[in-house]
Amino acid sequence: MHIDSVLKKEGISIVRSLNTLEINRIAKNISDKICAHFSEYLLNYDDLFSSIARIDMYLAKMPSNDVAAKYLYINNSIYFNDTIDLSVSENSIFALHECIHFIQTKLNDKCKLERLGLYTLGNSGIALNEAAVQFMASIAQELNFDNAKYYDININTISPDCYPMQCALLNEMVYFTGTYPLYHSTLNSNDLFKNTFISYSDKKTYNKIEVNFDKILKLEDDLYYFTVELQNATTEKDIKSLNRLILNRKTAIKKVFLSTQELIIRNLLYKRI
């Protein structure tokens, strides 16, 4: 597919290219943080910096302000929402997230995307991988775990603003596996984390958790869509209908989260006893 068609499909409209100085500053910042926090994964600083510095980077109009950045492997480019001030250190987490996607991208012999960290194309697992990438970006950004409340559930998450519930669940999985398998699989696109988790539980449990992560992501997408529609609703009928749909999605997210949490704790603790 031509890149113009891809950008149109993604709702991305380029404002301007980042210059060499801006890209090199981002590449240094990201390389410093990734190599400092994940040194045991044998990442070469100079190679990583050179690779990131060769990524084309743009400021762009995005489909919504909630989309901070997007990495596209087909033209090795990162598009940053032009509402984001990239000079603010707190915002480097967006570049961290997308650069981890760049590192984990695995192409086949025909240069087609085959795997992205924990996610193999054609299977479940895209939300689990997004959570893993955000988890690692948050670690590299040196964020702290914090208690927060979502959909009447108190959770402990390292990422309150992006995939908070998925990161909370992933942290519970990591309690049993340790972080090494997670980071290794996220960066190198392999099954070490999956197999380690299965060794503590079973394949059926892992697959169910993987599917539930995707369910939560889809429900959150629906919730965002209905919330935007509610802001533009003008009739009492539409307002009532959208409020009902919003409540339905919030209830469903809570249900899937709690059932996933129960799967993680019950199965793993039972096997340990």
Image: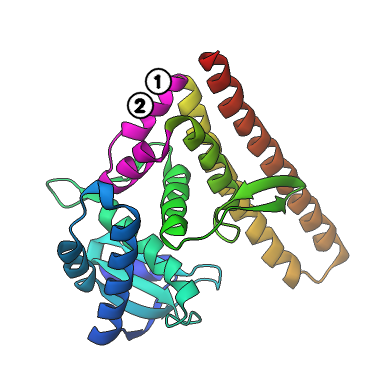
In terms of secondary structure, what is the magenta stretch mainly?
Answer: helix
Q: Secondary structure at mark 2?
A: helix
Q: Secondary structure at mark 1?
A: helix
The residue at the point 47 percent across, 37 percent down is 174
**C-alpha separation, residue under disc 2 versus residue under disc 1:** 6 Å
What x and y, as percent, mark residue 251? Answer: 75, 43
> How many tags in the picture?
2
Q: Nearer the viewer, residue 216 or 243?
A: 216
Amino acid type of the residue that numbered disc 2 sits on in the rendered structure: Asn
The disc placed on residue 195 is 2
What x and y, as percent, mark residue 69? Answer: 43, 69
The disc placed on residue 199 is 1
The disc placed on residue 123 is none
- The stretch in magenta equals 178-203
Amino acid type of the residue that numbered disc 1 sits on in the rendered structure: Ser
Query: Magenta stretch containing residue 193, yes or no?
Result: yes
